[in-house]
Image: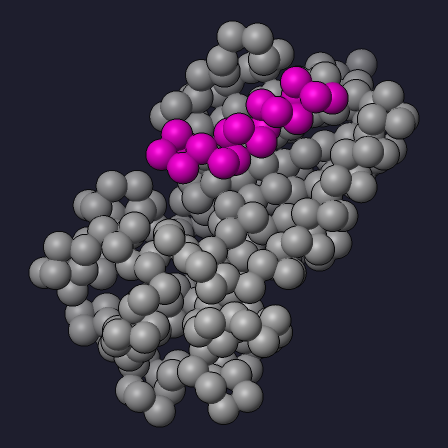
């Protein structure tokens, strides 16, 4: 809370765990995934197996059963109060905020964060591209709808497979072993992020990095949090029920709890400080 009171810029870094308090499933390990999608248990497929672009060539009805179900789930999901708390903090700072997230669910945009202050390093499920990505085009998926996708079968009819200019489409998400991801949208986000980082450097700002729900299995978010604190100075607040430790040499604090609980606790302490 003390660091936030003095801060002039906020970097929010978020992994999948931030969405748990909004009711999104936790896919760490196979248990949560298989509970949500029984066919994957029957086929002994984990999340990494499904995050493979080859599915959209081999069995697009099955691929879109999985990704289409998630797309509709994310559209229905209301971001928890913690999102609003961080946006309020950032909007009150001199250098405002930026969001770095590995999540593809679009929850920060849904919570009112500015589109030009977000980098989605793995892309977004709410955008489409062709299977090979060679045309360099990315299209919003706003008009894509699916009928009721039964999690017990996890298939969509062939006529519901999304298309881009008459060609089969896939989500604009960076998957494992993905040579065909069209990364231009995320590239533009990256350039805006680096511009914000440079503005923080020039103004000798006090940075606070609030990291939420980022585990060690895919450490992109954690490494970004730590690198920014090392590069710009400031404080890392790491909130995670597991893997909450902050490494030696990084100025930071950890809270071993859920995102919403941790943010509300910090906000309460910050309000007391500001009232003094």
269 up-or-down from 141: above or below:
above
Q: Is residue 218 rendered magenta in the image?
A: yes
User: What is the basis of the colouring in this image?
Assistant: one colour
Query: How far across and how far down the image is residue 40, in percent?
Result: 18, 60
Q: Is residue 8 visible?
A: yes
In the rendered structure, the answer to whether residue 111 lies left or right of residue 27 reads: right
The quadrant in which residue 36 appears is: bottom left
Q: Main secondary structure of the magenta part?
A: helix
56 up-or-down from 50: above or below:
below
Query: How far across and how far down the image is residue 208, in percent?
Result: 69, 25
In the rendered structure, the answer to whether residue 153 lies left or right of residue 26 reads: left
Quadrant location of the N terminus? top right
Query: How far across and how far down the image is residue 73, in percent?
Result: 41, 64
Query: How far across and how far down the image is residue 181, in percent?
Result: 50, 62
In the rendered structure, the answer to whether residue 262 lies left or right of residue 244 reads: right
Nearer the observer, 70 or 268: 70
Residue at x-position 62% and y-position 55%:
186
Quadrant location of the C terminus? top right
Residue at x-position 34% and y-position 72%:
56
106 up-or-down from 61: above or below:
above
Residue interval drawn in magenta:
215-232
């Amino acid at each position: 809370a003390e660091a936030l009171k003095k801060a002039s810029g906020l970097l929010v870094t978020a992994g999948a765990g931030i969405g748990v308090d909004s009711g999104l499933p936790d896919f760490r390990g196979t248990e949560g995934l298989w509970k949500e999608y029984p066919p994957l248990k029957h086929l002994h497929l984990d999340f990494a197996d499904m995050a493979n672009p080859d599915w959209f060539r081999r069995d697009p009805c099955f691929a879109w059963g999985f990704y289409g179900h998630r797309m509709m789930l994310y559209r229905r999901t209301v971001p928890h109060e913690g999102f609003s708390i961080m946006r309020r903090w950032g909007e009150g700072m001199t250098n405002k905020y930026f969001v770095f997230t590995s999540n593809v669910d679009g929850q920060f945009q849904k919570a009112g964060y500015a589109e030009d202050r977000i980098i989605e390093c793995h892309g977004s499920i709410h955008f489409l591209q062709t299977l090979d990505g060679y045309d360099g085009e990315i299209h919003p998926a706003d008009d894509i709808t699916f009928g009721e996708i039964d999690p017990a079968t996890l298939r969509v009819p062939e006529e519901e497979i999304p298309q881009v200019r008459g060609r089969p489409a896939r989500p604009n998400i960076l998957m494992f072993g993905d040579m065909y991801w069209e990364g231009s949208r995320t590239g533009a986000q990256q350039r805006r992020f680096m511009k914000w980082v440079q503005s923080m450097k020039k103004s000798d700002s006090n940075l606070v990095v609030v990291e939420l729900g980022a585990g060690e299995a895919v450490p992109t978010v954690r490494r970004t949090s730590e690198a920014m604190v090392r590069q710009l100075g400031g404080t890392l607040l790491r909130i995670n029920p597991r893997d909450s430790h902050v490494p030696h040499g990084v100025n930071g604090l950890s809270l071993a709890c859920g995102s919403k609980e941790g943010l509300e606790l910090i906000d309460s302490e910050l309000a007391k400080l500001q009232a003094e």
